[in-house]
Image: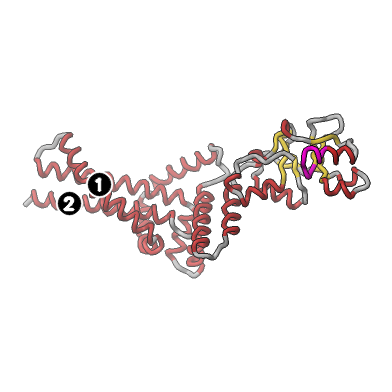
Amino acid sequence: MEHLLKAIAAVVLFLVGLRLSAFFSGAETGFYRLSLPRLSIDARAGEKWAKQLLWFSKNPAYFVATCLIGNNVANYLTTAAIGWGALILFTETTEQIDIAATLLMSPIIFQFGELLPKSVYYLTPVKRLQKDIRWFRYFFRAFIFLSYPLVLITRLFEKLSAQKHQPAEIVLGRSRLVQLMQHGHEEGVLTDVQSRLTNGLLQLAPQVVTSSMTPVARILGMSESATREELLVFAKKIGISGIILHRDGQPDNWYYYSMVSELLSAKRTKSVIREMPVINPKSSKLVALHQLQCEQATYGIVRNSEKIYGIVARNGLIAQIFRPEMAESPSRSA
C-alpha cells in the first residue's frame, strides 16, 4: 500500500510540474501577443484583468522574471518526480537509469508542457491570460523576493548597454505596434504607404543621426565668398540642388547653405545664404528631422562644441522613412 501511495504521489508531482510548465510557457507566449490598445480600452472600461495585464505590460521585466522562475520550478518538480518514479520502480537507481527515464519522459514534457500550451496561447492570448492572470499574480507575489533581483540586474544591464535609452517597455511597445500595423494592413485598414511610413518611423527611431550624415571629408561645397555665377557653375557641374558653404578661409568649417532655385532668382548671393541649424551628434534621426522641419532648413550641421561631424539632409531622412530597408545607408552628399 505504501509503495502504491508513493507511486501516486510521484505521478501527482509530475503532473503538477507539467501543469506549471504549461502555464508559464503559455503565459509568456501570450504576453508577447497582447495588444496594448485593446488592453488600454478594456482597462478604462473597468475590467480588472485588463488593468492587471496592463500593469505587467508597462513593467514587463517582472512578468518575464516570474515566468523564468516558474519554469525553473516546474522543471525541478518534473525532474524530481521522474527520479522518484524511477526509484520506486527499480528500488535502486543509477545515473544511467535517471538519464534514461528523463529522456523517455522528455517528449511528453515538451509536447504538453511547452509546444501545445504555446500554440494555444499564441492563438488566443487575451482569452487565456484573462483567465490566468489571477493565478499569475499569486505566483508573482510568491516569487517576488527571487524575481526582484533579476529585475534589478536587467535594469543595470540596460543602463550599461549602448541601448540604455531603450528600456524593455519601449522595445515591447514597438514590437506590438508593428504587430498591430501588420494586422491592420492585412485587414485592409491601412494602405501600403501608411504601413511603410509606420515601419520606417519605427526603424528610424533608435538610430543616431550620424549614421545618415555626409562626413566632413566627403562634403562637396564652396566658400561663402563665392559669387553667384561661381556657385551656379559649381552646382551645374556637380549636379546638385543645394550648395554647402564653409566660412571664408576655413575649408572645414561648414556653416551655411544655398539652394540653386533661390540663386537663379536672387540678385544678391548673400540674400539667399542660410545658416544651417546645429544638430547634436547623439540625436536620433527622428529628432534631427523634427528639428530641420521646425526650422524649415534643408540641411543641418552635425556638430558639438568640439568637432564638426558632417552634414545631414532633410530630404534624405524623409526618403528613409518610406524606404526603411535603406535606413542604415548614409545619405549622399549635397
Region rendered in magenta: 234-242
Q: Is residue 45 left or right of residue 197?
A: left
Q: Percent position (x, y) of residue 251?
A: 81, 30
Please identify the quadrant where the C terminus is shown: top right
* Residue with the mark numbered 2: 11
Q: Secondary structure at mark 1?
A: helix
Q: Secondary structure at mark 2?
A: helix
Which residue in the rendered view is the most extreme toward the front? 237
The residue under the point 50% across, 43% down is: 155
The residue under the point 28% across, 51% down is: 113
20 within the magenta span: no
Residue 164 picture quarter: top right
Q: Which one is earlier in the sequence, the residue at label 1 or at label 2? A: 2
**Residue type for callout 1:** Leu
* Residue with the mark numbered 1: 77
**Residue type for callout 2:** Val
Q: Nearest the camera: 243 or 124?
A: 243
Q: Percent position (x, y) of residue 131?
A: 36, 63
Vertical arrangement, residue 253 with respect to residue 49, above or below: above
